[in-house]
Amino acid sequence: MKTIGKKNQTKIPVFITARMGSTRLPGKHLLEICGKPIIEQMITRIKHARLPVSIVLCTTSFPEDDVFAEIASHCNINIFRGNPTDILKRWLNAADHFGVQYFISAEADDVFCDPEFIDIIIQELQQNMYDYIACRGLPFGVTPTGIKVEALRKICSLKKEDDTEGQERFFTKTGLFKVHYIEVTDPELMNPDARMTLDYPEDYEFFKKVFSYLEKGGDFFSLKTILHLLEEHPEIMEINNKMQAIYEQRYKEKYGAVDLNRA
């Protein structure tokens, strides 16, 4: 996968957002699975997408996040270091730095972010004038999102300085933007009870268990393969299933409604 130049206005990169400052699971992106930091496992997965021009690891300017520069170098991807607390501004500065009009957002928590849907969203962004694209019907923590930079710029100019979390709500709840959802109807991809995001120790145990079953098949296994495994072994979903209710309650207390389409 090639790196991108600052004047490239037509290609769409993937931004992976990561930092060391997690409070619920400190250092979570460096936790090891099958001998690699979990973020390297995610990067390997995203490299199977065909259409992104590049992968950019978007982290903070804090010294504690120097480790991500090392990871980016090791994985041969780009690095951008920006605003330590405001992810939206960090994205905007990264987009301006690389001179892109759109990007795909993939949170580093979402280890099984699906490369097939990265390609599908890129195709939609290249063919239509959407400000924000997500998917409906995939398990929680799988879907990437597509973002138009000028829509992001407008959000950054309007929002309160300290209002930084729950980024998807700025696009989907304000009524200011052209939002599109890709409706997933394949029953083999639909499991609303599966939680595939890394936020709590139980989530880490879930990912370790899935990898322990599937990693012998190579460095990439499809979303369908993962979901077939969970169908055969429903006890794996029980490892972190209760954490979803905790997440939803925390989100509801902050923002008044739960948006399960976040990346």
Image: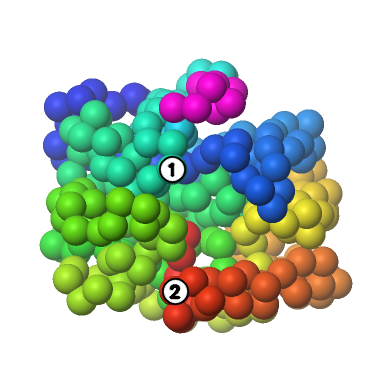
Name the foreground residue: 13 vs 19: 19
Whether residue 219 sits left or right of residue 61 in the image: it is right
Q: Quadrant of the N terminus?
A: top left
Quarter occupied by residue 246: bottom right
Question: The disc labelled 2 sits on which kind of residue?
Answer: Tyr
Query: Where in the figure is residue 187, as x and y percent of width and height?
Result: 56, 81
Question: The disc labelled 1 sits on which kind of residue?
Answer: Thr
Residue 34 visible in the snapshot = yes
Q: Reading the chain from its start, which is encountered first: label 1 or label 2?
A: 1
Q: Is mark 1 on a helix, strand or loop?
A: loop
Q: Estimate how packed mark 1 is, as few (under 14), some (14 to 19) or many (20 or more) residues with alpha carbons within 10 Å.
A: some
User: According to the image, label 2 marks what residue?
Assistant: 255
Quarter occupied by residue 81: top left
C-alpha distance separating marks 1 and 2 = 18 Å
Query: Where in the figure is residue 35, as x and y percent of width and height?
Result: 78, 31
Look at the image and give the residue range highlighted in magenta: 61-69
Name the foreground residue: 7 vs 200: 200
Residue occupying the point 79% across, 50% down: 208
Name the foreground residue: 54 vs 169: 169
Residue 71 visible in the snapshot = no
Q: Is the magenta stretch mostly helix, strand or loop?
A: helix
Q: Estimate how packed mark 2 is, as few (under 14), some (14 to 19) or many (20 or more) residues with alpha carbons within 10 Å.
A: few
Whether residue 173 sits left or right of residue 262 in the image: it is left
Residue occupying the point 50% across, 27% down: 62
Query: Where in the figure is residue 164, as x and y percent of width and height?
Result: 39, 54
Q: What element carries label 2?
A: helix
Residue occupying the point 71% across, 69% down: 243
- Disc sitting over residue 85 in the figure: 1
**Is residue 39 inside the magenta stretch?**
no
Residue occupying the point 37% across, 32% down: 82
Is 146 drawn above or below residue 228 in the view shown?
A: above
Quarter occupied by residue 112: bottom right
